Amino acid sequence: MNNPALLALGGTLLCGALATAGLHTYVSGKAQRQALVDRLSATEHIPLGRQRRFTGVDRRLRGTTLGRKLQLKLSATGLDLTPGEFFVYMLVTVAALWLIAASLLAPFFGPIAGIIGAWSANTFLNWQRQKRIEAFINQLPDVARLLANGTSAGLALRTSLAMAAAELDAPAGEELTVVSNQLAVGRSIDETLGELAERLPSRELVVLVTTLVLSNKAGGTIVGSLRNLTETLEERKETRREVRTMLSEVNATAFTIPCLGIGAMLMLNSMNEGALAKVTGSPVGQILILVSLGLYAAGFIVIRRLGKIEV
């Protein structure tokens, strides 16, 4: 024990063993963390393979209320975009529309075009979200049918959800895969289904989620409830299709009226070059332009409201 060489050798071996054990623990922990990230990456509908742009902007934006709302809306659209990417693309589009309107029409129309560009970006997200919600609603009868079949076969609700996720196409398959992955890492059915209803809000999905949550908590005849719900969802699906067909002309009219106003301004400016610049060169002309644009916007909103029927 008094030999310094043996003490040094023993200390070296001990340090080597501890270092090897620590390295093994670090590598295994890193592999587990990466596997968890891979499983949860579907929650945001962002594949990990593509190189992301504007990561600094995205990191700062996610810490704000606007970024969190934008992330929630993007996750519901299924677009392969991060909040930072969408925000930067929107700013570039707004700047481009500002410059184009200012150069083609008059400098007064630059800020107006920028505001319209920002509104259009938000409208595009809402349209993509509603489009995905409609597609998901059309698949809800199949979701309820698969869940009923799995439950009647003796499978647990978690297993039935995973089976339905594997059987269905997008978007229902993708959304149920997110739910299945979240359940696999220990989250409760109430939380995961509640987030699904928040991402894709609709009356039909709320009814299905409420049925599943109540049956999971209190038990009961979940199979019979799901089979009855399947028939109801099929009927609502047909009703929604008929209503959408009847209102297609009204919706087309709502978009046609603003386009006619913009086309008239462009035609007037092309026939008499600089006419819009002269009109907007005085406060009275600017007020009249704003009033006319407001009337077009009001007409668009009123027609959309009249043609919006909740089923």
Image: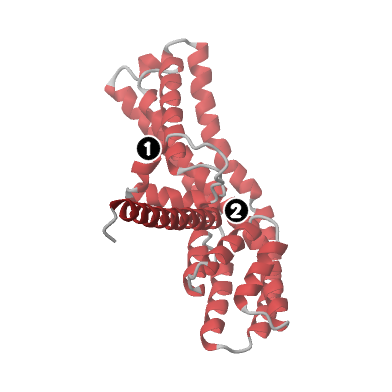
Residue drawn at (69%, 63%), measured in percent from left and top? 166
Whether residue 16 can be seen here: yes
Q: How is the image coloured?
A: secondary structure
Image-based side of 174 in relation to 90, left or right: right
User: Which residue is most to the top?
Assistant: 273
> In the rendering, at what x and y percent does residue 171 appear?
63, 56
Residue bearing the label numbered 2: 132
Q: Quadrant of the N terminus?
A: bottom left
Q: Position of residue 196 (x, y in %)?
A: 52, 64
**Residue 249 versus residue 228: which sits nearer the camera?**
228
Nearer-the-camera pick, 51 or 118:
51
Residue in the picture at 34% in, 42% down: 60
Q: CA distance from mark 1 to mark 2?
A: 27 Å
- For the image shown, how many numbered marks are present on the structure? 2
Report the residue that reaches farthest toward the front.
3
Determine which residue is flagged by label 1: 57
Instruction: Of the two numbered discs 1 and 2 on the same chain, state the one appearing first in sequence.
Output: 1
| Res 94 → quadrant | top left
**x and y percentages locating residue 221 in the rendered image:** 63, 88
Q: Residue at x 64, y 73 (%)?
A: 159
Residue beneath the point at 61% across and 42% down: 252
Q: Quadrant of residue 152?
A: bottom right
Instruction: Find residue 294 and report its horizontal and vertical position in percent.
Output: 40, 37
Residue 224 in the image: above or below residue 103: below
As displayed, is residue 2 above or below residue 67?
below
Q: Element type at marker 2?
A: helix
Amino acid at pointer 1: Val
User: Is label 1 or label 2 in front?
Assistant: 1
Q: Quadrant of the C terminus?
A: bottom right
212 vs 190, left or right, is right
Type of amino acid under label 2: Arg
